[in-house]
Amino acid sequence: MSVESLSPVKVPVLRRPAALRHLGTPAALALVLGVLYLWVSTQELDSIEKRTLNRTYIVERVTEHLRLSFTAALLVVVIAVPAGILVTRPLLRRATPLVLVVANAGQAVPAIGLLVLLTIQLDVGFRTAVIGLVASAVLPVLRNTITGIEQVDRSLVETARGMGMRPLQVLLLVELKLAVPVILAGLRTALVFAVGTATIATFVNAGGLGDMIVNGIKLQRMPVLVTGSVLACAVAFLLDWLGSLAESLLKPRGL
């Protein structure tokens, strides 16, 4: 028998599809929400708790919470990504520290204090809450946009210029395309941060799951408090999971 016939046979490795690697979070959330539902179902709810722990009220609060979070995230992208691009251009590079200081101020100020100051100027409502959320969440996206663009290999940029690409083409097709994973990581952070901060939007009459949490504390109703808190956490994990899917789908091949 030849030596070649004794060589080990290579067995192909079966890899899980990319979609299956992301099913852990929704499965865990479904399990937690199922346990929460079963626990609430076993409680003897009084009239106050029944007015809160019903489908209509919960759907309304979750919808308000998502509306606050997504509106703030959209405005953060519109503000932070262009600002991050501008300060990476040679003419405005010196303004980077100043822009970061301004963005950091919004996150350094306690969220409840910032909402109070905004309420004095703008009155209570949805707009006030969104402005507070944007000010608090703009830093991660801005910083990651700057970092992502600056980490692009300069040789690739010079090669693109040598091929005759215009500055805008180099920015869109090379720098931003390679910086997408870093920018999306910042957006994930901002989204989760916005979901957590949106719970205090109830203090400016903007609704959200904070209503349930505050009512549970004030009225000393543990089922209401636990339900509001778990739902807020579930929304944060869900949005983070959606962000991870977006990263996988938008990540350039080969990275």
Image (cartoon, helix red, strand yellow):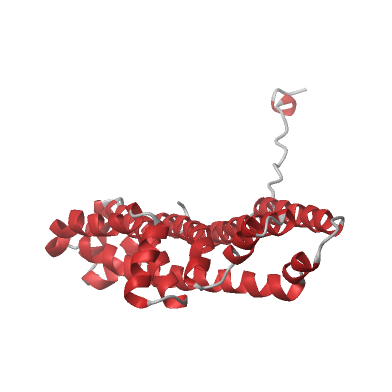
Looking at the image, residue 135 sits to the left or right of residue 23; the answer is left
Count of marks overlaid on the render = 0
Of 244 and 164, nearer the camera is 244
**Image location (x, y in percent) of residue 104:** 29, 54
Furthest toward the front, the residue is: 219
Of 24 and 180, nearer the camera is 24
**Image location (x, y in percent) of residue 66:** 57, 70
Quarter of the image where one finds residue 120: bottom left
**Image location (x, y in percent) of residue 137:** 40, 60
Q: Is residue 19 visible?
A: no
As drawn, 125 above or below 132: below
Looking at the image, residue 255 sits to the left or right of residue 213; the answer is left
Looking at the image, residue 32 sits to the left or right of residue 119; the answer is right
Q: Residue at x 74, y 25 (%)?
A: 6
Q: Residue at x 35, y 69 (%)?
A: 118
Quarter of the image where one finds residue 64: bottom right
As drawn, 2 above or below 153: above
Looking at the image, residue 9 sits to the left or right of residue 128; the answer is right
